[in-house]
Amino acid sequence: MFRKLVRSFLPLPRPNALSANPNPHRAPLDFALVLVDAETDEQAQRTVGAVVDAAIAHEGEVLQILGPLVFVAFSRVVGIGGIRKLPMREAFVSQLSSDHKAHVRIVHGCADALVGLVGSKNKWVSYTAILDNFDSILLCLASLKPGEAAERSTLGARSN
């Protein structure tokens, strides 16, 4: 029971992800960033929960929830085994856009990313992905109005 509780709070990778390549490495990532717009705490909680449920239903991995921002990846195991094709991500975006139109802004696409265990050199903190050109993806997200979605793929467009 305790193990299940702990796992529900920690973004742990699947066991085969660690055995394959836990060190940070470059990989393409099919992603969605969802910004939740809500006027009340209850609406925020309900909408973030709906985003997480939709991600799971469409075989996505919720990599991070940072306040109202939800970062979802659609790779089989994040950064390992190639990217999943568009239908899962597009179905996820379509569902959120219709079911929660007034409360979400979405940027989705495919980008190169640094994927793996990141943190300090003394202790890893999280198995996650750092998207290339994240600043331009965030700017795109900030320019959207509630209910809008934009596709932004940045494969091969790394800025150093």
Image (cartoon, rainbow, N blue to C red):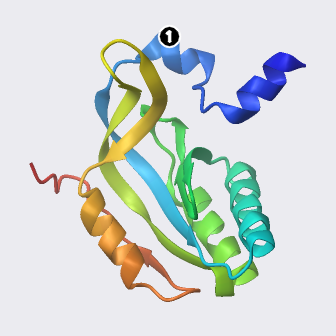
Vertical arrangement, residue 2 with respect to residue 158, above or below: above
The percent position of residue 160, horizontal first and vertical second, equals 9, 48
Number of marks in the rendered image: 1
Residue occupying image coordinates x 73% and y 69%:
47
Q: Percent x, y for residue 31? A: 47, 55
Nearest the camera: 68 or 59? 68
Residue at 51% across / 72% down in the picture?
A: 106
In the image, residue 12 lies at what x, y percent? 60, 26
Q: Which residue is mark 1?
A: 19
Check disc 1: other Cα within 10 Å, few if <14, some if 14-19, many if 20+.
Answer: few
Quarter of the view holding residue 46: bottom right
Q: Quadrant of residue 152?
A: bottom left
Q: State the SS at label 1.
A: helix
Residue 81 appears in the figure = no
Instruction: Tell me what residue is drawn at x 30 percent, y 16 percent.
Output: 121
In the image, 159: left or right of 30?
Answer: left
On the rendered structure, is 5 left or right of 48? Answer: right
Three-letter code for the amino acid on which mark 1 is drawn: Ser
